[in-house]
Image: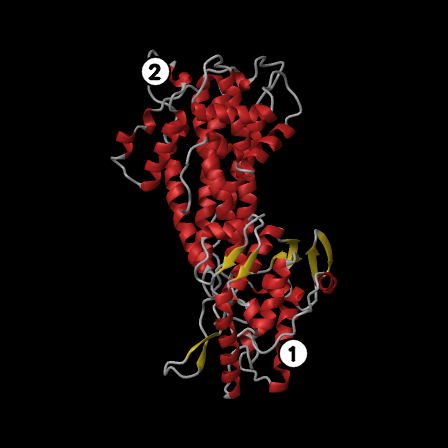
């Protein structure tokens, strides 16, 4: 049985968020409930003073100067949910929606949002009982929070819109009823507390990080397999090279590549007498390129770990300066610039990992460079072999390069210029899902091509680690003797990569993006 993740606000690890993304149940730590209760009562005390407080007894955005009567405070919160549920596009993938819900629960668990325990219980109950809101994925500019997507999540909590329940799409009210949940009745500030935050952008960026880890490690394996197929040298992985340029990622990748090739009979076969003095950059510079990617991915992961444990609501309910009562402070924690920068960095890394892998594929199918049969087929001409899979990899690599243009440099004024600078974190993070899919297909093609290339060196074998990977692939995809319908082979290899089986088969502790 999958272990339930405890959402202890400010203390949830990336490993825990990754487990939730993979489907693990999650629940707010019991120790957080007194803070939630205290925040709820603190808000009541602030309201009792009668002073105007943004979004609690005033309008929103440009309408912040409009005072709302006490009798309408609950209606105000329902209205913000309904009016802001203006998203468009395909629904978020359910694993990312679950992650968004967990992030919101952890944020509210700090007790700085003024939400009632009863309302928080509805969101927790939905996550626990698999009532997952249908959330359109377009409509957020990454400030003032991810308003539209979080509004769709919140609408489901009050029985409006649609949800997935037990993999069936249905009206939200029906899904809540089937799960034995009552719709939330929003009180003062609760709609705003649910909508205001970076949880949509952060969920997508975290998902991109988790996918990037598997893909990064897989690319080390496929890269060294291609090196073997091309009878490339392991000299570029020698630690004496990297001690002179000691970037942590570069050294870690060089160590991993060297260990993956250790004991290879293929490598031993051309230690002497090879007239090639240096390999192409796509083989020789793997530690430098992959190491640079590792370093920036680790930085992005650290940023997202902080963001995932933060409160990104507005206004915030905080203790009074005099130690008495509480204050409602308007700030800008909803601005998702940190997430936007992190997403842009992850996008750059995904694009470059794919670009390097595509160059290795192009090299290995070219007989002038690889000294293998053209397009890795025993009968070139009659058969085209890996000719078009390389074209597919090139198309995907170019698509990822185009998607890697930074989102964070863009901004556009919203809400009648009240919200005049935004982060664009939402679509910056959302693109990572498709970029990771593209990279997975590129690496699947390289995995097949590298295994095919190594087949031509039989009876020589590679290292134990790489032979275990080849055996894994050959159990699913036979050697290409004559042309066949190729798409299923790529899909099978992509499945092996997505499941993590390729990395596990290598049997080594490959560099990770977080500890």
- Residue visible at 53% across and 52% down in the picture: 204
Residue 484 on image: x %, y %: 66, 21
Question: Residue 98 shows which numbered tag?
Answer: none
In the rendered structure, the answer to whether residue 387 lies left or right of residue 355 reads right
Q: How is the image coloured?
A: secondary structure
Observer-nearest residue: 311 or 472? 472
**Is 162 drawn above or below residue 506 in the view shown?**
below
Q: Is mark 1 on a helix, strand or loop?
A: helix
Instruction: Indicate which disc, 1 or 2, sits on the residue closer to the N terminus.
Output: 1
Q: Kindly indicate the quadrant of the structure image that contains residue 326.
A: bottom left
Q: Residue furthest front?
A: 1
Mark 2 crowdedness (10 Å alpha carbons): few <14, some 14-19, many ≥20: few
Q: What element carries label 2?
A: loop
Question: Residue 75 shows which numbered tag?
Answer: 1
Would you say residue 394 is visible in this rendering?
Answer: no
Would you say residue 432 is visible in this rendering?
Answer: yes
**Is 58 drawn above or below residue 223 in the view shown?**
below
C-alpha distance separating marks 1 and 2 = 77 Å
Residue 372 on image: x %, y %: 49, 16
Q: Kindly indicate the quadrant of the structure image that contains residue 465.
A: top left
Question: Residue 271 shows which numbered tag?
Answer: 2
């Amino acid at each position: 049985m999958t272990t339930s993740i405890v959402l202890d606000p400010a203390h949830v690890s990336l490993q825990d968020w990754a487990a939730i993304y993979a489907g693990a149940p999650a629940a707010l730590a019991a120790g957080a409930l007194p803070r939630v209760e205290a925040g709820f009562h603190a808000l009541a005390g602030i309201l009792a003073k009668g002073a105007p407080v943004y979004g609690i007894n005033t309008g929103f955005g440009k309408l912040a100067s409009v005072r709302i009567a006490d009798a309408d405070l609950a209606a105000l919160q329902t209205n913000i949910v309904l009016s802001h549920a203006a998203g468009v596009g395909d629904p978020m993938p359910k694993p990312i929606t679950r992650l968004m819900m967990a992030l919101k629960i952890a944020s509210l668990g700090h007790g700085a949002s003024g939400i009632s325990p009863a309302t928080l219980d509805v969101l927790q109950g939905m996550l626990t009982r698999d009532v997952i809101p249908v959330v359109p994925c377009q409509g957020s500019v990454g400030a003032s929070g991810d308003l539209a997507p979080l509004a769709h999540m919140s609408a489901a909590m009050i029985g409006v819109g649609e949800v997935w329940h037990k993999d069936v799409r249905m009206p939200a009210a029906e899904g809540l009823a089937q799960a034995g949940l009552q719709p939330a009745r929003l009180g003062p500030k609760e709609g705003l507390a649910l909508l205001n935050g970076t949880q949509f952008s952060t969920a997508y960026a975290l998902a991109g990080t988790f996918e990037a880890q598997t893909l990064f490690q897989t690319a080390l394996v496929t890269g060294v397999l291609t090196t073997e197929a091309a009878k490339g040298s392991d000299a570029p992985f020698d630690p004496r090279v990297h001690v002179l340029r000691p970037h942590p990622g570069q050294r870690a990748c060089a160590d991993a590549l060297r260990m993956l090739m250790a004991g290879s009979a293929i490598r031993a076969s051309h230690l002497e007498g090879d007239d090639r003095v240096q390999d192409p950059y796509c083989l020789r510079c793997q530690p430098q390129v992959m190491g640079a990617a590792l370093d920036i991915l680790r930085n992005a992961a650290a940023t997202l770990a902080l963001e995932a444990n933060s409160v990104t609501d507005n206004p915030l309910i905080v203790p009074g300066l005099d130690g008495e009562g509480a204050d409602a402070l308007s700030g800008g924690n909803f601005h998702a610039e940190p997430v936007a920068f992190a997403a842009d960095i992850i996008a750059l890394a995904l694009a470059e990992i794919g670009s390097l892998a595509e160059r290795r594929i192009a090299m290995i199918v070219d007989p002038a460079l690889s000294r293998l049969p053209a397009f890795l087929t025993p009968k070139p001409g009659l058969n085209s072999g890996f000719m078009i899979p390389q074209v597919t990899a090139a198309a995907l690599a170019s698509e990822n390069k185009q998607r890697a243009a930074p989102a964070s440099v863009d901004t556009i004024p919203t809400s009648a210029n009240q919200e005049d600078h935004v982060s664009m974190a939402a679509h910056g993070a959302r693109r990572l899902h498709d970029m990771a899919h593209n990279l997975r297909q590129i690496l699947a093609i390289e995995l097949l091509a590298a295994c095919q290339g190594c087949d031509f060196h039989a009876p020589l074998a590679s290292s134990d680690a790489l032979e275990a990977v080849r055996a894994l692939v050959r159990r699913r995809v036979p050697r290409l003797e004559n042309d066949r319908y190729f798409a299923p082979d790529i899909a099978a290899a992509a499945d092996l990569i997505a499941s993590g089986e390729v990395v596990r088969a290598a049997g080594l502790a490959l560099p990770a993006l977080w500890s």
